[in-house]
Amino acid sequence: MHPTLPHALVALVLALPALVASSAGGEPPVDAQSTQATEHDGAHAAEDAQDGHANHGHDADADAGLPAARWASDAPLREGMRRVRAATEALSHGAHGHLDEAQVKAVAAELEAAVQDMIARCRLDPEPDAALHPLLASVLRASATLAAEGFDPSVLADLEAVLARYPQLFEDADWSEDHNASA
């Protein structure tokens, strides 16, 4: 693989929500995270709206962003999401002040590495691939924020939202069992 290709893919992943919004007449796709916008300050609310976050309430609008049936996942996706979950669980110790700056930076590096690996190795059909991009973009934003600013509870919440969204979109038979075993 060409050395600059992963960087170009990351840029594309990060730009995808804006591209989808502009091609869909300015309306971003709906997903289950929009009420977080009311919990963030004005700057975060604008970012959340651009990223396509939707209402946490369970209604027809919240389900509109879900596929009729969950998409198949491949091994690199499943492995990568388990890495994201493990890093998120490690980050949760920061909420109690149990992580130093080096540990937070290590979590940030692991999150970025997990996404880069998924970008390089996942082989999904176009529709599930497009559904995965906002999740990966959220993880990359979280990684960048952690690396630059240290622990932030809102970043932990964003990562937890990604982990909640993943099994709504993708088949992963061991996801719940894996989580229960590690908890």
Image (cartoon, helix red, strand yellow):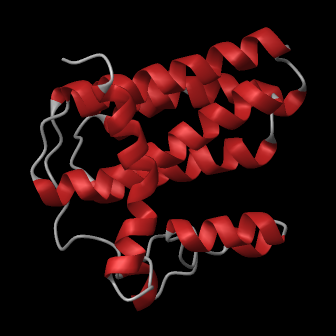
Horizontally, is 19 left or right of 163 in the view?
left
Horizontally, is 41 left or right of 72 in the view?
right
Q: Position of residue 65 (x, y in %)?
A: 35, 75
- Look at the image and tell me whether residue 29 can be seen: no
Residue found farthest to the top:
102
Q: Quadrant of the N terminus?
A: top left
Q: Residue at x 20, y 25 (%)?
A: 121
Horizontally, is 68 left or right of 174 in the view?
left
Quick check: 44 above or below 172?
below
Quick check: 27 above or below 147?
below
Q: Residue at x 24, y 26 (%)?
A: 120
Q: Position of residue 72 (x, y in %)?
A: 13, 48
Quick check: 24 above or below 37?
below
Q: Residue at x 13, y 55 (%)?
A: 126
Q: Residue at x 40, y 90 (%)?
A: 60
- Look at the image and tell me whether residue 151 can be seen: yes
Q: Position of residue 62 (x, y in %)?
A: 45, 80
